Image (cartoon, helix red, strand yellow):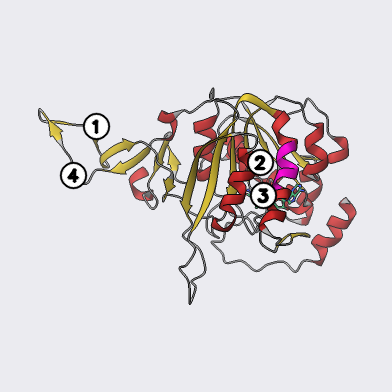
Amino acid sequence: MIRIYEAYIEDQPKKKRALRNRTVEISENEIAGLKLGIVAENLLEKNKKDLIICGNSFSVLPRLIPKSFDLMFADPPYNLTKDFGKESFRQTTSDGYEEWLDSWLRLCVPLLRPTASVYICGDWRSGAVIQNAASKYFKLRNRITWEREKGRGAKRNWKNATEDIWFFTVSDDYTFNLDAVKQRRRVLAPYKENGRPKDWSDGESGKFRDTHPSNIWTDITVPFWSMPENTDHPTQKPEKLLAKIILASTNSGELILDPFAGSGTTAVTAKKLNRRFIAIESDEQYCLVAAKRLELAKIDKTIQGFKDCVFWERNSGNMTK
Ligand SMILES: C[S@@+](CC[C@H](N)C(=O)[O-])C[C@H]1O[C@@H](n2cnc3c(N)ncnc32)[C@H](O)[C@@H]1O
């Protein structure tokens, strides 16, 4: 398997990148070292944590420890025909997609602690199906819609600029750390009571209020070429998005499961926020990218858009300095 991967790397024409392009890349002489950071499915040791497992979730999930995870973040292939490295997903009917969702969800259910939370990503087309499939096992709490700035315009339809994340819990007893995910917003109409700011603070960089986070997230930037978290994965999720979910729904040291790890965003963000993780990805190249991002996270724990324990509005870079 590894040899096939090396041949594959050699076959790839090296991409030409602009000088300021910070996309995470793997050079040939890094491969051997990075392989030490991932575990092949057949070498999995049950009790180990902080793993990128290179394998098929359908065979890995039954081998994980029951009732051990505090959070599952699942970003499965959407019901679209799409290539993921050497793997691909073929679009199917809504019923077919619901069956496929059920086929891996039912393997995850026994792995979750009674207090666990579950987040599942999807697009508007599969909304009803995702909700049906997961409501069989979990309690539905909400659906988060986040704005993707990127997206193709349509000539005869509204441009699709959002994606959804369904939020479920296993029971009514679950973690939600509200204060950890409040959003700092500029105060446009600063109201004072007895000459003092009411519910807002007047700091050096301006007037701000920490507000309750809603289920519409307009502060997320999809990774692009000049961001250090950017990779060549076609559907990479932003670290800031994962940071909100991890901080809201877990405490330090708790264990997170990602059955469709891609470029490793869940694992990397978990590491930056002192959580544990097990992330499964079938494509070896993406596993190595995840391993490299984990190495980089040892040195740089920053998460773009999240600074001094505060989630800032999009494009508020200057104010956070
Ligand atoms: C939507 S992407 C996840 C992207 C990820 N959240 C990130 O930030 O990079 C889905 C991933 O699932 C992987 N995948 C698909 N089927 C799988 C399976 N049966 N087992 C493990 N991984 C799988 C694909 O290779 C792809 O990288």
- Looking at the rendered structure, the secondary structure element under dot 2 is helix
Which of the two discs, 3 and 4, sits closer to the camera?
A: 3
Quick check: 210 left or right of 270?
left
Establish if 274 lies above or below 88. above
User: Residue 69: in sight, yes or no?
Assistant: yes
What residue type is disc 4 on? Ala
* Residue displayed at 63% across by 47% down: 75
Crowding at label 4, few (<14), some or many (≥20) Cα neighbours within 10 Å?
A: few
The image position of residue 134, as x and y in percent, is 63, 40
Quadrant in which the C terminus is drawn: top left
Segment colored magenta: 101-106
Q: Which kind of residue does numbered mark 1 sit on?
A: Asp
Q: How far apart are marks 3 and 4 (CA)?
A: 42 Å
User: Residue 312: which quarter of the image?
Assistant: top left
Q: Mark 3 points at which residue?
A: 76
Q: Mark 4 or mark 2: which is in front?
A: 4
Q: Is the magenta stretch mostly helix, strand or loop?
A: helix
N-terminal of the pair, mark 4 or mark 2, is 4
According to the image, label 1 marks what residue?
A: 199
- Pointer 4 residue: 189
For the residues bearing labels 2 and 3, Cβ distance under 8 angstroms: no
Q: Mark 2 points at which residue?
A: 294
- Three-letter amino acid code at disc 3? Pro
Residue lying farthest to the left in this orientation: 194
Element carrying mark 4: loop
